[in-house]
Image: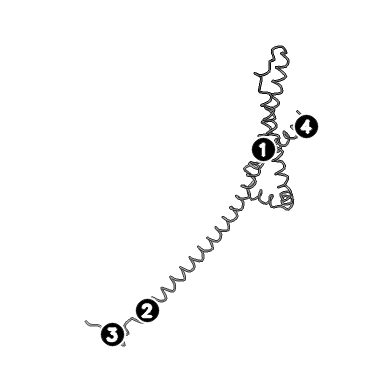
């Protein structure tokens, strides 16, 4: 394998490791968000967007080159290889390498896009979880306040009712004389 394809394969293996690491279930999205929001990662991300676009462009270029190589070695009908049996094996070997390179470049490109999307989704999930907790605390606070206000309202209604009853109750100067036997 040539140096460029060894580098692409190494890049692919690193991406596979990173995707598997991001998919580990016991590392919470909050931790990933804290990691993504760290000063080091923010600096890398600031300069990394350009590097990401360059990496995408290189991978697209290598994928196009690999597709071209596959098409070049796939035309066995136009070349007469009956006089040289070793040439058939050589063509098959080159075709195999071209196909291998095509898969390596294609999967590296795909995983590069998936990795970026996965990191974005983990950050968004962590932000949503944080806002969900804030909304939950706010709702609990509003619920507690509403209960307090309802209890105060009930107490005020009882006081108002007892005051109203006290005002409208008949006042008899001497209750013994008004009782009829």
- Marks 4 and 1 sit apart, C-alpha to C-alpha, by 18 Å
Q: Residue at 66% of width from left, 50% of height from top?
A: 33
Q: Earlier in the sequence, mark 2 or mark 4?
A: 4
Q: In this rendering, is residue 121 above or below 164?
A: above
How dense is the environment of label 1, judged by Cα within 10 Å: few (below 14), some, or many (20 and up)? many
Residue 111 picture location, percent across and down: 65, 38
Q: Earlier in the sequence, mark 4 or mark 1?
A: 4
- Marks 1 and 2 sit apart, C-alpha to C-alpha, by 80 Å
Contact check, label 4 and label 1, Cβ < 8 Å: no
- Left-right relation of 116 to 171: right
Q: Residue at 73% of width from left, 53% of height from top?
A: 39
Asked whether 15 or 93 is in front, the reply is 93
Q: Secondary structure at mark 2?
A: helix
According to the picture, the residue beneath numbered tag 3 turns out to be: 176
- Marks 3 and 2 sit apart, C-alpha to C-alpha, by 25 Å
Contact check, label 3 and label 2, Cβ < 8 Å: no
Q: Quadrant of the C terminus?
A: bottom left
Q: Residue furthest top?
A: 83
Q: Earlier in the sequence, mark 3 or mark 1?
A: 1
Q: Secondary structure at mark 1?
A: helix
Q: Quadrant of residue 159?
A: bottom left
Comparing marks 3 and 2, which lies closer to the viewer?
2
Residue 62 picture location, percent across and down: 71, 34
Q: Secondary structure at mark 3?
A: loop
Asked whether 27 or 109 is in front, the reply is 109
According to the picture, the residue beneath numbered tag 4 turns out to be: 3
According to the picture, the residue beneath numbered tag 2 turns out to be: 164
- Marks 3 and 4 sit apart, C-alpha to C-alpha, by 117 Å
Q: Earlier in the sequence, mark 3 or mark 2?
A: 2
């Amino acid at each position: 394998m040539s140096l460029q394809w060894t580098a692409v394969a190494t890049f692919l293996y690193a991406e596979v490791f990173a995707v598997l690491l991001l998919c580990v279930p016991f590392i919470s999205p909050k931790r990933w968000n804290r990691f993504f929001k760290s000063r080091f990662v923010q600096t890398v991300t600031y300069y990394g967007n350009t590097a990401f676009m360059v990496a995408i462009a290189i991978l697209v270029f290598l994928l196009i080159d690999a597709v071209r190589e596959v098409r070049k070695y796939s035309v066995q009908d136009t070349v007469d290889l009956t006089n040289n049996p070793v040439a058939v094996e050589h063509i098959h070997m080159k075709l195999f390498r071209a196909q291998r390179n095509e898969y390596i470049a294609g999967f590296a490109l795909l995983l590069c896009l998936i990795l970026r999307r996965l990191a974005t989704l983990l950050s968004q999930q962590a932000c949503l979880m944080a806002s969900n907790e804030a909304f939950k605390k706010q709702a609990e606070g509003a619920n507690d306040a509403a209960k307090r206000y309802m209890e105060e309202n009930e107490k005020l209604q009882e006081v108002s009712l007892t005051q109203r009853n006290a005002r409208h109750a008949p006042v008899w100067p001497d209750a013994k004389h008004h009782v009829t036997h």
